[in-house]
Image: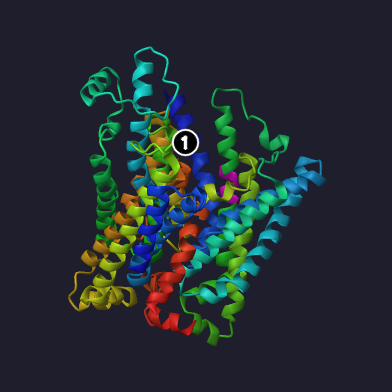
């Protein structure tokens, strides 16, 4: 019984870690900047495919992963910056239009991946030292997988915290999101910061894609499988707070495994009930588990509350 | 109005006389496009006028399709199911509907265990009512919960997307009684119509034309009055309308529910022409969202101006 509970907890931990990995890039682009990027899942896919391509050229798995991680960051960083420059920049403060535009981009990227790599799932093989079992007890498999994915998640969390709290870029990002005008008058270029932040979020999604690709097969639709869950993780946790995203991923992962345990034969039903629970949860706590308070919350609000307060939508439409 | 006349005329020409003037596939494409137009009109009201963008486009569309599809499938396969349950070989011609008296049929059914979810599928009236009721009630409950706690803008969009995912996952299950990921098929065979393709499509087109016409009239009347001004006000500044003393939640809930109900109806008209429905149609894939998003984005914009 204790063994089973431990097994369940480890499974839940690895699911929560995967959700966290999928959501962390979104915690930057959606959580910090307030941009709804529906193509986020496709950045994850891009990162995973980068890993696959690197493995075609570099046969040594350890080396290939080490090359793939920075390369995936570079590729998705570039893609993110290009997307910000070409599309998203023109749609700040118009979240619904951003949502539709990025939806379109995500279809295009999915189709592009299908054209290049085909519809078949591609393998991304983990090196032996990552893949081997840690012990010989009954729960060693889930223990290995859980420790692997939670280690990845912790590394990403540390990276996020370091960049946001300890670097010049993080400082400027926080300044721009709280008050773009004030930041601009302090000599920060908000355009540039927005571009870099979006690129950083996309790059993180790319690295997470390599990590997720090690646990799952790489297909052109792998991003689409995670997009709803990632958004829910960020929203449930509380927008604009990385600890909230962590809490949200933990809650969703553990809850889903728990419901699966109640009815083990039907994992689809577990997902259904989990989503229903989240919908109800958001009704009663619309700001998530950890809600921002004070000026930080106000600073982010206007860009996110559907229609910008100062410019009615009809005015915006007349301009275009 | 002209459109309506045109559609009735066209459907009569195809359905009644079957002249072969227009090919069946073209009529089907036309009909399906019309159904998507119905959605676009509905979405224009809810997004263009009221500013609520929901990503659950095809959840309610698919629900309507499932409701009508259950009836169509039940009627088509009833004899086969009874005979196979009785241990006999199924009839060769699956499309032929035998003239079995309904009393005998129901007594035969009593021996067969059917999932309770199919209990309403036997007559046309029940599914037709359900096409309106099920999406309407679901939207009412969902909308009431969401608007009451003031979930707005992007949060609402993501919430509706989550709801769509939950619905499609539910339908994907094999034990939900709705044939899992295979979905319902053979919906193009309308019972009682022997010249299958042309006649069926004609009837559907007739209903569709009438529906679209009536809807346009009703909508023009609704948005030209005070109601239209209020929902436009909600789109521009929700808080201002609330401070002016209007029950914003009530207005939004009404628009939201009406939109969902229309999608259910559009879906019920669409899927008999498509012939097949499965949960993948409902899944919140970017493809389906874009499909309905692109026409309505233009429509919403044009009326908003």
Quarter of the image for the N terminus of chain B: give it.
bottom left
Magenta span: predominant SS is helix
Q: Seen in the image, is A44 located left or right of residue B105?
A: right
Relative vertical location of residue B235 with respect to residue A142 in this rendering, above or below: below
Q: Secondary structure at mark 1?
A: helix
Q: Nearer the viewer, residue B266 or B297?
A: B266
Q: Seen in the image, is B194 located left or right of residue B261?
A: right
Q: Would you name the residue on which mark 1 appears?
A: B181
The magenta-colored residue range is A150-155
Q: Is residue B261 magenta?
A: no
Task: State the residue at coordinates (66%, 40%).
Answer: A121
Task: State the residue at coordinates (46%, 32%).
Answer: A8
Q: Nearer the viewer, residue B80 or A248?
A: B80
Q: Is residue A8 visible?
A: yes
Q: Is residue B271 visible?
A: no
Q: Is the residue marked by circle 1 packed among few (<14), some (14-19), or many (20+) residues within 10 Å?
A: some
Task: State the residue at coordinates (29%, 47%).
Answer: B131
The percent position of residue A123, horizontal first and vertical second, equals: 69, 39
Quarter of the figure with residue B129 = top left
All told, the count of numbered labels is 1
């Amino acid at each position: 019984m204790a063994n089973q509970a431990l097994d369940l907890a480890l499974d839940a931990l690895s699911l929560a870690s995967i959700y966290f990995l999928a959501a962390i890039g979104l915690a930057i682009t959606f959580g910090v900047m307030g941009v709804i990027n529906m193509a986020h899942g496709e950045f994850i896919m891009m990162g995973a495919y980068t890993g696959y391509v690197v493995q075609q050229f570099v046969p040594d798995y350890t080396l290939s992963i080490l090359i793939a991680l920075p390369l995936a960051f570079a590729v998705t960083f570039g893609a993110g910056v290009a997307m910000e420059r070409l599309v998203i920049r023109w749609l700040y403060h118009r979240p619904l239009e951003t949502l539709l535009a990025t939806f379109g981009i995500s279809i295009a990227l999915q189709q592009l991946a299908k054209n290049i790599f085909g519809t078949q799932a591609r393998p991304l093989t983990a090196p032996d030292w990552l893949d081997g079992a840690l012990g010989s007890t009954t729960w060693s498999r889930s223990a290995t997988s859980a420790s692997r994915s939670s280690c990845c998640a912790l590394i990403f969390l540390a990276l996020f915290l370091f960049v946001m709290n300890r670097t010049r870029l993080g400082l400027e990002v926080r300044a721009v999101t709280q008050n773009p005008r004030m930041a601009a008058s302090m000599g920060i270029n908000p355009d540039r910061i927005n571009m870099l932040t979006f690129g950083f979020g996309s790059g993180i999604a790319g690295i997470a894609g390599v990590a997720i690709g090690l646990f799952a097969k790489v297909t052109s639709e792998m991003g689409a499988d995670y997009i709803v869950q990632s958004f829910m993780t960020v929203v449930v946790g509380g927008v604009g707070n990385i600890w909230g995203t962590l809490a949200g991923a933990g809650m969703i992962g553990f809850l889903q495994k728990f419901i699966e345990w109640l009815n083990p034969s039907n994992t689809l039903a577990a997902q259904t009930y989990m989503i229903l629970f989240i919908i109800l949860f958001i009704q009663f706590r619309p700001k998530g588990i950890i809600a921002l308070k004070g000026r930080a919350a106000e600073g982010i609000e206007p860009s996110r509350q559907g229609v910008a307060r100062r410019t009615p939508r009809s005015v915006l439409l007349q301009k275009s | 109005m002209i459109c309506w006349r045109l559609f009735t005329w066209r459907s009569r020409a195809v359905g009644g006389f079957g002249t072969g003037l227009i090919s069946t596939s073209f009529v089907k494409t036309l009909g399906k496009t019309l159904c998507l137009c119905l959605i676009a009109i509905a979405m224009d009201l809810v997004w263009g006028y009221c500013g609520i963008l929901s990503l659950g486009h095809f959840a309610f569309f698919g629900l309507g399709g499932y409701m009508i599809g259950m009836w169509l499938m039940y009627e088509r396969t009833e004899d086969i199911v009874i005979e196979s349950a009785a241990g006999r070989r199924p009839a060769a011609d699956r499309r032929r509907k035998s003239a079995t008296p309904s009393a005998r049929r129901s007594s035969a059914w009593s021996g067969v265990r059917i999932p309770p979810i199919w209990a309403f599928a036997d007559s046309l009236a029940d599914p037709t009512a359900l096409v309106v009721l099920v999406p309407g009630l679901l939207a009412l409950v969902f909308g009431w919960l969401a608007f009451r706690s003031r979930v707005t803008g992007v949060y609402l969009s993501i919430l509706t997307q989550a709801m769509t995912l939950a619905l499609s996952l539910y339908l994907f299950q094999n034990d939900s009684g709705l044939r899992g990921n295979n979905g319902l098929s053979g919906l193009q065979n309308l019972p009682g119509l022997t010249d299958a393709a042309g006649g069926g499509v004609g009837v559907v087109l007739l209903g569709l034309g009438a529906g679209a016409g009536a809807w346009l009239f009703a909508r023009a009347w609704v948005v030209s009055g005070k109601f239209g001004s209020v929902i436009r006000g909600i789109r521009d500044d929700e808080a201002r309308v609330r401070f002016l003393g209007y029950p914003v939640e009530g207005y939004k809930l009404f628009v939201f529910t009406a939109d969902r109900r229309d999608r259910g109806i559009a879906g019920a008209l669409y899927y008999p022409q498509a012939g097949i429905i499965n949960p993948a149609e409902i899944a919140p894939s970017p493809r389906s969202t874009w499909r309905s998003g692109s026409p309505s984005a233009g429509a919403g914009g044009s009326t908003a101006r």
